[in-house]
Image (cartoon, rainbow, N blue to C red):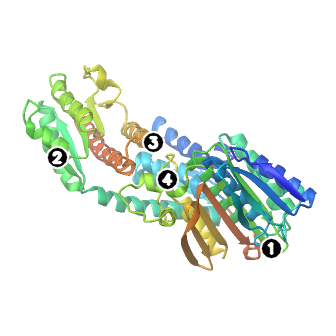
């Protein structure tokens, strides 16, 4: 399918103009569950674009879905030399930047709390292997049923918190740790919760905790959901200058996003395998 | 002849334009500004001075702080020489931050008039200029946290085009220092230089990736243009592929970016082919 950029926007100069194209591509692929072939994005009739436009159109997609998404679903056609050069430069530079940035993040620690159900125990073992291979530094909660001092110490030393709740029997145990991570340690926090689990979250925590339900929806939708949460929190720090170390908080949220994306990839892989 | 002006608490381009017209019509020799001992007026006066200096020519205006008492002081701007501004319809452009596609369209119409009708460059490929213009313009809109920014464009007989962008917002240096608290910036000029590196961004919006100032730098070098960034307590000048960074003797609230672009380096327009493809 060919998408003519001129039909989507007339503003080829700003990030906002680019984002109209980016949003269109994202919605088309995610909602229509677009198939195997890349969408062909035509720049016919467009004299020039700014790097800001490329940010909104393509780098935004990389942020939301990763580099593979762009490779799989997007192909640029009918561009003039300058437009093609601006796109190539921006995308290649950003790929390179992400590679270096992610490599630096591997020294940071992600605390992962998994409940003690059979499903949780399987996750724990397999996630440990997977994250080790991917080079992430995941620290898992101790294999016990009460929130111990050891767990508290691990959370304190980690940069971000991710919890996985597979069953209603164990939600209290994971939520207690999440509460500690948010209230006591001010860590970025995200919970993965199986779609049929009904959580009982304390009132004071409700606005502070982000929950992604897995086991329904599609992988790209969830990935988009995670990254929107990450972007929203990053922007909140930037706009309000909530603390004096904005950059570190932004980096921590980026780490949380990457860790969460790795986990959701695993959770969907498991689901597909079950089917 | 003397003109005395009260500088408004909030400097706006409208004020500058009225002043400019008044100056042109009056054949003045000296202008006095009431400079109340108030920080924001102080800052505005400096912004005004710098803008006028850029707009009215490179040599003609000097700043003389001729009197200062507890309640009142004066900025004196001396006689303007070699005023080189394009014709009345398009000598300058003033735009408030763009928040809608309609406003972007308006901006493009202004630019189109300026680039294609009023300047004798119909056969030149002005796209590099347009990119510079928009990248800088969006900088004001997105990063300055100020409601107004102002932009002046002038074109002289010597084929030099000058853009001046300014806002009285937070300033690049302060913003960089507030965001990258783990880095050490001995001076504001260091922070400006850091901001010009590729992919350095304070990520004010999700679309900011830190390419704007670096794109500016690349174009400045590629087209042998000159760039001066004045911001907070520092200044960075790029000219002849050399970068000079120094400290200001005053504090400039916000950012002023001035670009001098020699139109002789623009290429002639070519037939455009839409044949390129990219597989990522």
Residue mark closest to the camera, 4 vs 3: 4
- Please identify the residue farthest to the left as the structure is shown: A144
For this rendering, which residue is in front, A135 or B105? B105
Which of pointers 4 and 1 lies earlier in the amino acid sequence? 1
For this rendering, which residue is in front, B1 or A202? B1
Q: CA distance from mark 4 to mark 2?
A: 35 Å
Task: Tell whether label 2 touches label 4 (CB within 8 Å).
Answer: no
Q: CA distance from mark 4 to mark 1?
A: 35 Å
Do the residues indicated by labels 4 and 2 lie within the same chain of the protein? Answer: no
Residue mark closest to the camera, 2 vs 3: 3
Residue that mark 3 sits on: A235
Residue B21 is situated, as x and y percent measured from the top left of the image, at 87, 54
Q: Which mark is residue A139?
A: 2
| Residues packed near mark 1 inside 10 Å, few (<14), some (14 to 19) or many (20 plus) | some
Q: CA distance from mark 4 to mark 3?
A: 15 Å
| Residues packed near mark 4 inside 10 Å, few (<14), some (14 to 19) or many (20 plus) | some
Q: Which mark is residue B159?
A: 1
Chain bearing tag 2 is A
Task: Tell whether label 1 touches label 4 (CB within 8 Å).
Answer: no
- Classify residue B203 as left or right of residue B261: left
Q: Which mark is residue B175?
A: 4
């Amino acid at each position: 399918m060919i998408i003519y950029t001129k039909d989507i926007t007339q503003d080829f100069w700003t990030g906002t103009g680019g984002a109209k194209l980016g949003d269109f591509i994202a919605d088309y692929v995610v909602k229509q569950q677009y198939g195997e072939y890349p969408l062909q994005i035509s720049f016919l009739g467009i004299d020039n674009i700014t790097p800001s436009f490329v940010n909104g159109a393509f780098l935004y997609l990389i942020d939301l879905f990763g580099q593979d998404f762009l490779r799989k679903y997007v192909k640029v056609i009918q561009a003039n030399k300058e437009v093609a050069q601006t796109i190539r430069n921006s995308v290649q530079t950003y790929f390179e930047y992400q590679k270096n940035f992610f490599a630096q993040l591997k020294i940071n620690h992600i605390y992962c709390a998994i409940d003690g159900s059979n499903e949780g125990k399987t996750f724990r073992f397999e996630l440990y292997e997977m994250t080790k291979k991917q080079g992430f530094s995941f620290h898992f909660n101790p294999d016990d049923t009460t929130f111990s001092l050891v767990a508290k110490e691990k959370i304190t030393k980690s940069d971000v918190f991710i919890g996985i709740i597979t069953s209603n029997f164990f939600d209290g145990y994971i939520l207690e740790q999440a509460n500690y991570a948010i209230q006591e340690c001010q860590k970025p926090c995200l919970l993965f919760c199986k779609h049929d689990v009904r959580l009982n979250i304390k009132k004071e925590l409700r606005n502070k905790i982000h929950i992604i339900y897995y086991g329904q929806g599609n992988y790209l939708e969830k990935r988009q959901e995670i990254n929107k949460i990450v972007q929203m929190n990053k922007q909140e720090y930037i706009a309000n200058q909530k603390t004096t170390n904005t950059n570190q908080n932004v980096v921590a949220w980026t780490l949380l996003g990457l860790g969460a994306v790795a986990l959701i990839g695993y959770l969907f892989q498991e689901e597909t395998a079950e089917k | 002849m003397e003109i005395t002006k009260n500088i408004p608490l909030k400097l706006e381009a409208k004020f500058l334009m009225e002043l400019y017209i008044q100056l042109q019509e009056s054949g003045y020799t000296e202008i006095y500004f009431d400079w109340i001992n108030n920080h924001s007026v102080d800052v505005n006066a400096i912004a005004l001075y710098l803008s006028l200096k850029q707009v009215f020519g490179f040599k003609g205006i000097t700043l003389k702080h001729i009197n200062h008492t507890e309640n009142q002081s004066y900025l004196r701007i001396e006689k303007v020489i070699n005023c080189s501004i394009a014709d009345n319809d398009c000598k300058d452009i003033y735009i408030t931050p763009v928040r809608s596609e309609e406003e972007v369209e308006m901006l493009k119409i202004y630019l189109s008039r300026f680039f294609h009708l009023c300047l004798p460059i119909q056969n030149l490929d002005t796209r590099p200029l347009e990119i510079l213009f928009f990248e800088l313009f969006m900088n004001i809109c997105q990063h300055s946290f100020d409601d107004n920014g102002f932009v002046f464009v002038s074109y002289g007989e010597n084929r030099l085009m000058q853009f001046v962008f300014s806002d009285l917002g937070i300033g690049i240096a302060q913003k960089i220092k507030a965001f990258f608290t783990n880095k050490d910036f001995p001076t504001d000029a260091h922070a400006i230089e850091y901001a010009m590196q590729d992919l350095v961004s304070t990520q004010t919006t999700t679309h900011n990736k830190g390419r704007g100032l670096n794109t500016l730098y690349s174009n400045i070098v590629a087209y042998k243009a000159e760039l001066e960034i004045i911001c907070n307590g520092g200044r960075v000048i790029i000219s002849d592929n050399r970068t000079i960074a120094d400290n200001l003797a005053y504090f400039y609230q916000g950012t002023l970016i001035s670009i001098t672009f020699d139109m002789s380096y623009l290429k002639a327009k070519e037939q455009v082919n839409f044949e390129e493809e990219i597989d990522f």
